[in-house]
Image: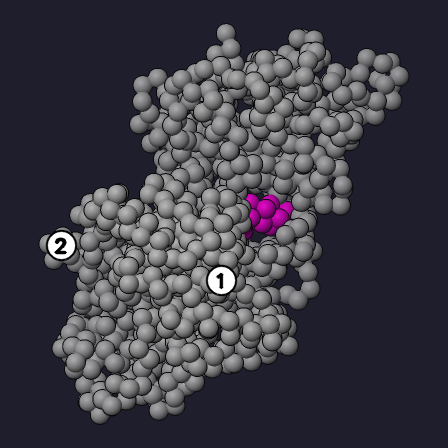
């Protein structure tokens, strides 16, 4: 490997990575399979690709081309050198609106092409659900389709010319009429014309095998089209000319409700004569909530287009009239359509979990049958599942007869793997019996190539082998795919994971307490690699800032997988590779909600840091900011806040302090409040007013010591709404809810003073033993509150999220933790639930800012939206993460990424705000980031409302 690496470094201008991290990031795609490559190369251009092929041919090392790594059949994995086209060869070379074509490099993400084509009224027809991160090269390699294939066909239908390098270094320009055909291909086809005319099923989604029938003379001898779907086994794509289609000016979405899945499937083909753009289907077991959907147990999503909204709607209503439905809904509002489509697109991830939370896997992800036979096929498919004791939830492109499904295969035991094999073989026969294709979108890869003789017969498969030999006589390109394949039950990615549960600190309730199962959640669909956030989404800010796979949620999950496997990453919890990948995780928790399978990388990071630094000295920032509540309480008790502020204002002293504390030199140290919130509360009287429901207001560290104005404002608003406000007890043993202290001499003698804390700063720095101790002390203090029905109102979203999730998951053995978690309300939730008749003061101004990432991911912001609307605060808050994220943005080495995250959405939204707009930022980190990077003062919603009470 050393000679190979050295030769590649001499020959290639792009990056060459033979290190552990580079290899670990590419061991898997979105399939069940895993292969460990020797190294990864990110070529800068076609010359680099040619150089890689020459070096690898000399060393007899295979080459695998890789785009977004979202392949579901294993074809983006390999044991040789992986070519990563996403880093450099990712340009949109140009668009010709007159010719309706675009020239692209293989690493360009589909959405970038769509965004560039949209101003011309054009688009690329195929659009897989992974459109925000899949690449054109990968789409050509798999002949991808997407939801609009009933209107615009497959990727092969959209390809005009392809620039390709063969394994032996020939540069070919593939097109029609044998353009670019390698020597020997035409003779091969001329000798097999009868077989090519009769041996290939005629259906819209026949993706399996090589498309040799595209070389027939009556089909234009289209070498480019024949190359599509070859999964990187014939040549390496370096550039493509693709066809664009006219995008309808207006669209409408008809959602048709049916009693069950079979009814929806049987109806789909009958809608095709109406010329829809899509006919997508899914059943109720894939939908987290049926809210917003018409009545039914299954639905067809039928999109129509037109020059005007009225025309599109009329076509959608015609679809409804032609369909025999239980209920129907027609949506023309673009926002409403996006919301509904998101349900369908996220199915590729949500399908990996059964309704009871158990795991489900690909393998029979996308077989296709003639659309008119879809209902019968689904019934046979369901019967076969039952016969094998398996469960799955079909969904997908009903109009094309293509079904996606994840099945709860047991891929961890020998018996389960054997059943996986038997089921696959029997289902292949069912598909073929219905005149179908083993793959209808994602290619054969390792998952289905072994079964191709059942579909095509041995002689046609032998023809595939001969075609492969014409293009790649040395079998250098992606060997083991399509021809001479590896067994479908070999190289399973689960086989390397530990069989016994790993000893961990968090409870992982959704994964049965098994950390390996938690890491297995990441199936590789890579929504975290999306380069732009739509709406209020958050995930994954560090990937958008760096563009590096290692700093995506998927990349980190892959490294954790390899850490557990112990083959590549050999030093377990002490791994520096895993530590470095997690270092730029902001712990924003965006993946907990935005990832379709709810990977929770913030928790995994805290778990890893706990074990990584066990018994060792930690980074200075962990002591400086992890123990922030202690230092701030010390300053408050000694009344030295003015002294601290004065010292921090002296630049040389501040520089020394920041260096010692591991704080970024670019950061200003926030000023401590002269009077803490609790001290103000006691000076005010320390008792709740008379009135309505009692609410306990949580004095989080940030509100208490850094932003007491937020606490004071919240008290004013809550009391104005008729609520009685109390603070948590500060004495363990004899405290009474509502007074904050106890005036009984006996109580003072028998109780211990303390202050509640959610433990957030300890959790985020992985100091879980300390976090657990702080949380238990908090539960002791909160015991009197838990004996009442009073809710706990938390103003700081990150602290509220810690109490909602980290507390019960870390103290999973203490029933009090779940009880306190269930009591936590946000400021808006408290007003909505406990003062429903109260009307907030009218603000009547536009609002800008950002929904706190923890609020988005854990708490939800529906109540906040309604409160803002009631107060006349108009406009939508942006998504993403502010980039400061508690301690993250203050740590040395994080400033540039932190600022880049803020520039993603928050700062542009504030700069573009209309005059007089209110800048909302409920989180202390968000307010600090705004102040330090934009010179803007953000305010908590409580402050805005309190100001208007006057």
Above or below, 457 against 353 in this view is: below
Position in image of residue 55 (x %, y %):
30, 74
Percent position of residue 656, x then y: 50, 28
**390 on left or right of 330:** right
Report the residue marked by disc 2: 96
- Is residue 416 one of those drawn in magenta? no
Q: Residue at x 60, y 72 (%)?
A: 386
Left or right for 262, reference 469: right
User: Residue at image x 31%, y 77%?
Assistant: 202
Color encoding of the figure: one colour
Label 2 Cα neighbours within 10 Å, binned few <14 / some 14-19 / many ≥20: few
Whether residue 343 sits left or right of residue 332 in the image: it is right
The local secondary structure at tag 1 comes to helix
x then y, percent, for residue 504: 68, 52
**Magenta span covers which residues?**
598-610
- Between 713 and 393, the residue placed more toward the observer is 393
Count the numbered circles shown.
2
- Whichever of labels 2 and 1 marks the residue nearer the N terminus, that label is 2
What secondary structure do most residues of the magenta stretch adopt?
helix
Q: Quadrant of residue 9?
A: bottom left
- Image spot of residue 770 (x, y percent): 69, 38
Which residue occupies 40% across, 39% down?
535
- Magenta region includes residue 608: yes
The residue tagged with tag 2: helix, strand or loop? strand
Which residue position is annotated with label 1?
261
x 28%, y 86%: residue: 198
Q: Are marks 2 and 1 in contact (CB under 8 Å)?
A: no
């Amino acid at each position: 490997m050393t000679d190979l690496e050295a030769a590649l470094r001499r020959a290639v201008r792009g990056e060459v990575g033979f290190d552990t991290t580079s290899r670990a990031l590419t061991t898997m795609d979105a399939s069940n399979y895993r292969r460990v490559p020797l190294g990864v190369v990110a070529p800068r251009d076609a010359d680099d690709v040619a150089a890689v092929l020459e070096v690898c041919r000399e060393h007899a090392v295979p080459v695998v081309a890789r785009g977004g790594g979202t392949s579901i059949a294993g074809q983006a994995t390999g044991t040789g050198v992986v070519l990563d086209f996403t880093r450099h060869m990712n340009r949109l070379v140009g668009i010709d609106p007159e010719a309706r074509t675009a020239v692209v490099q293989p690493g360009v993400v589909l959405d970038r092409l769509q965004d560039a084509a949209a101003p011309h009224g054009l688009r690329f027809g195929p659009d897989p659900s992974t459109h925000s991160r899949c690449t054109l090269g990968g789409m050509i390699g798999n002949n991808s389709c997407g939801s609009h294939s009933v209107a615009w066909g497959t990727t092969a239908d959209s390809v005009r010319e392809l620039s390709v390098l063969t394994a032996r270094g020939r540069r070919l320009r593939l097109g029609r009429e044998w353009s670019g055909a390698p020597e020997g291909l035409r003779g091969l086809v001329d000798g097999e014309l009868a077989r090519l005319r009769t041996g290939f099923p005629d259906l819209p989604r026949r993706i399996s095998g090589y498309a040799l029938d595209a070389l027939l003379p009556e089909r234009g001898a289209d070498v480019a089209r024949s190359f599509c779907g070859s999964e990187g086994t014939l040549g390496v794509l370096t550039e493509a000319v693709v066809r664009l289609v006219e995008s309808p000016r207006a669209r409408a979405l008809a959602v048709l409700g049916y009693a069950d899945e079979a009814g929806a499937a049987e109806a789909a083909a009958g809608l095709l004569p109406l010329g829809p753009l899509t006919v997508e289907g899914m059943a109720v077991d894939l939908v987290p909530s049926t809210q917003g959907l018409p009545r039914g147990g299954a639905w067809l999503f039928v999109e129509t287009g037109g020059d005007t909204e009225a025309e599109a709607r009329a076509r959608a209503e015609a679809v409804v009239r032609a369909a025999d439905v239980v209920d129907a809904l027609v949506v023309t509002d673009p926002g409403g359509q996006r919301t509904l489509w998101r349900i369908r697109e996220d199915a590729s991830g949500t399908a990996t979990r059964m309704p009871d939370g158990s795991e489900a896997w690909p393998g029979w992800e996308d077989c296709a049958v003639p659309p008119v036979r879809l209902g019968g096929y689904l019934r046979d498919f369901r019967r076969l599942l039952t016969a094998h004791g398996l469960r799955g939830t079909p969904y997908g492109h009903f109009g094309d007869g293509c079904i996606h499904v994840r099945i709860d295969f047991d891929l961890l035991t020998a018996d389960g793997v054997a059943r996986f094999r038997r089921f696959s073989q029997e289902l292949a026969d069912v598909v073929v019996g219905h005149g179908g294709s083993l793959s209808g979108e994602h290619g054969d890869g390792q998952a289905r190539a072994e079964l191709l003789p059942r579909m095509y017969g041995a002689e046609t498969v032998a023809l595939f082998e001969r075609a492969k030999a014409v293009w790649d006589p040395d079998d250098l390109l992606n060997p083991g795919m399509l021809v001479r394949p590896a067994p479908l039950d070999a190289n399973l990615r689960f086989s390397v994971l530990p069989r016994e549960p790993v000893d961990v600190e968090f409870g992982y309730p959704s994964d049965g307490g098994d950390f390996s199962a938690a890491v297995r959640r990441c199936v590789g669909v890579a929504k975290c690699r999306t380069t732009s956030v739509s709406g209020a989404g958050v995930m994954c800010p560090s990937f958008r800032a760096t563009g590096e796979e290692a700093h995506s949620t998927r990349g980190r999950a892959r490294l954790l997988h390899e850490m557990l496997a112990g083959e590549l990453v050999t030093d377990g919890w002490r791994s520096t590779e895993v530590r470095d990948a997690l270092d730029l995780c902001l712990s924003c928790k965006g993946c907990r909600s935005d990832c379709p399978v709810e990977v929770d990388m913030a928790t995994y990071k805290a778990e890893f840091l706990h074990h990584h630094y066990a018994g060792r000295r930690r980074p200075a920032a962990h002591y400086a900011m992890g123990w922030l509540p202690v230092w701030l309480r010390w300053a408050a008790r000694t009344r030295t806040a003015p002294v601290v502020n004065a010292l921090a204002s002296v630049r040389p002293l501040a520089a020394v302090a920041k260096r010692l504390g591991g704080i970024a030199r670019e950061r200003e140290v926030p000023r401590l409040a002269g009077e803490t919130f609790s001290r103000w509360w006691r000076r005010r009287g320390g008792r709740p007013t008379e009135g309505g429901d009692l609410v306990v207001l949580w004095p989080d560290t940030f509100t208490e010591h850094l932003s007491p104005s937020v606490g004071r404002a919240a008290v004013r608003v809550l009391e104005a709404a008729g609520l009685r406000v109390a603070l948590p007890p500060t004495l363990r043993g004899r405290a009474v809810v509502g007074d904050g202290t106890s005036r009984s001499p006996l109580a003072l003698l028998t109780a211990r003073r303390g202050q509640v804390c959610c433990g957030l700063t300890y959790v985020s720095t992985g100091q879980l033993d300390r976090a657990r101790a702080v949380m238990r002390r908090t539960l002791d203090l909160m015991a009197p509150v838990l004996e009442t029905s009073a809710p706990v109102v938390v103003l700081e979203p990150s602290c509220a999220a810690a109490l909602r999730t980290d507390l019960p998951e870390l103290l999973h053995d203490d029933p009090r933790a779940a009880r306190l978690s269930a009591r936590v309300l946000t400021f808006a939730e408290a007003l909505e639930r406990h003062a429903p008749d109260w009307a907030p003061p009218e603000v009547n101004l536009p609002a800008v800012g950002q929904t706190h990432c923890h609020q988005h991911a854990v708490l939800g912001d529906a109540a906040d939206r309604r409160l803002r609307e009631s107060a006349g605060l108009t406009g939508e808050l942006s998504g993403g993460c502010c980039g400061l994220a508690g301690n993250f943005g203050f740590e040395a080495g994080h400033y540039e990424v932190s600022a880049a995250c803020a520039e993603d959405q928050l700062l542009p939204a504030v700069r573009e705000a209309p005059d007089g707009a209110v800048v909302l930022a409920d989180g202390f980190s968000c307010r600090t980031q705004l102040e330090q990077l934009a010179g803007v003062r953000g305010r908590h919603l409580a402050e805005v409302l309190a100001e208007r009470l006057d």
